[in-house]
Image: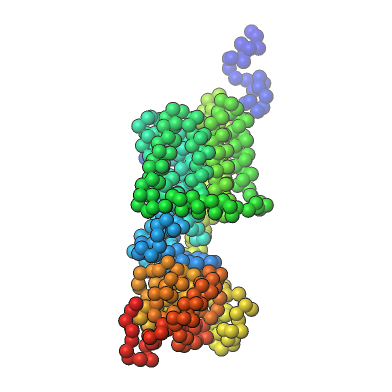
Amino acid sequence: MTEAQDLEGEFHETHYAAWRRPAPRARALTAFLYGWGPARVTQGVMLAVALPLVLAGAVAPAMLSLASTASVIAPVAEARALFAGAVALAQAPAPSYAALLAFADLLAEAPGRIHLIAKSLAAALILAAGVILFPARIARAPAALLVAGLCAVVAAPFADADEFALALLLTLLVALLAPPVRDTTTRAVCEGAALGGGFVILWLTNPAMPLAGLAALALAIFHSKANLLRALAAAFCFCLFAAALDLVAAGFNASRFSMAAKALAAIEPTGASLGGAAVSAGIVIFCAAVFGGREKWRSWASGFAVLVAGLWAAHVAAVDAAAAFFAAATVAAFSIASPFYDGVFRAHDRASVALAASAAALALFWSGARAVSAGGQLLFQLRAGQQAPADIRAELGLIQPGGLTLAQWIAEGRLAASETRGLFAMTPADQSAVLLDGATRAREIARRGLAVAILTGPDSACVIADPRPCRADGPAAAQAAKVVFVPRLDLDAATQAAKERAQVILYTDFMLAERTDLWDIWVRRGASLPGESANLSPRG
């Protein structure tokens, strides 16, 4: 009997090198990681993993924030101004996210709570898209962790519209570059139309990010004829919806292109470290390229395209790029074109099993780590909200580390406002205390029939003091107000700029009627503060 005939017979360990021997236990574990199942089961697992992240923010009593209080109020005021007609649709920075804030505004009053609900709604959109698109494209375990990681990016305490845009872009890229198992013409066209709508939402959120989808469309057409139809349908529907927006708001697309150009012009090279997620994604894509070769180029090429497009989009939006790395690794390792399935379920040995298991572990680890990290942040936010100062939590819905410093010292008479300007930095809690002090007095004046403005970057008074239609910004609100509250301290750069813009209006149309430790109160000529005269001017 020849050696070849002997090798074709019963397996003997002496005939193979150690790395060619089977590893049944390791293969069984790896097969579980790469295992598929009924779509409904996969969808149930995805909901079970991601839904707590979606709901955690909505049930929190307040939002954890390190930003200035005025910058937290700004998106809410801008959303109200947009839907009140004070801001043109073409000039709104993120109309789609403003719509989420406007809907959340119906369910909550405090700005922080409005942000929390809006983020939960945005995460719910990502979850819904993932539940519909991912089960036919990716194995069960990675599909669940991928959608959980993307939802975590959106629902995290410090996330905003840009994180939502990045998560949406990655969801669309996965759907384009990882075709489903059973692809048909009808399915491709229907999904393409839906993806086109998704790109329109992205266009309405961050106009620079859809440009990253162009490379994905160019690569998607080489997967199959059905995927070519999917890409063409997505491009056609995007153009159709964008043209419809131009009919609704003249010059809308020109304005979005201008915003995208400004965002691209503002990009600066950075030498920041990309971290372990980037290294892991690179290793997974490299292993897929070596193991799959030319025959499986769609796997590693698609993963590389997701990596480049996601990294570029994150850099444009100045957000954390970790989501791009674990999404790229998931596509390279777990899409139907992945070479690792052959190394586990077909001709296999312990080398192919070890390689597939390592790639799976790296991809799954970073998806799960992002979800766990966000879960910890959300849990901390929930607990910290119960211990936050009652007035800031109730009125603003915010948790601001650091506590009061300047505001407390001024209230206690240790310092005068003029002594602190330019010498001490205000903490976010200080800013909240100052704004709440002004809002309390502003509400009293507003109830007497006088339109009130608080001169900050946004129209803060319409959110925290006077329930009137919001104006475009603080100076615009001052132009229409009878009484203007001007902070004596510099809350943030936007407030300082607003004060400089409104100086001419204040000194020509208003008189300084009262000065407190924290506020200068200006009254329009011909009007008077409550208590000064019984003949109050009507609301303007």
Viewport quadrant of the N terminus = top right
Write the residue at 60% across / 37% down: 285
Q: Is residue 390 visible?
A: no
* x, y percent for residue 113: 42, 65
Depth order, front residue of 325/510: 510
Relative image position of residue 86 (x, y in whole percent): 38, 65
Which residue in the rendered view is the most extreme toward the front? 508
Horizontal placement of 102 versus 288: left or right? left
What scheme was used to colour the molecule? Answer: rainbow
> Which percent across, then down, holds residue 525?
41, 84
Position above or below: 406 against 279: below
The reply to whether residue 422 is visible in this rendering is yes
Please tell me how many numbered marks the rendered image carries: 0
Residue at 46% x, 28% y: name it.
224
The residue positioned 35% from the left and 49% from the top of the image is: 247
Please state, as top left, top right, bottom left or bottom right, where the C terminus lies in the image: bottom left
Residue nearest the observer in this picture, 384 or 531: 531
For residue 387, above or below residue 282: below
Q: Is residue 74 above or below residue 273?
A: below
Residue at 55% from the left image edge and 28% from the top image edge: 296
The answer to which image quadrant residue 405 occupies is bottom right
x and y, in percent, of residue 11 in the image: 60, 19
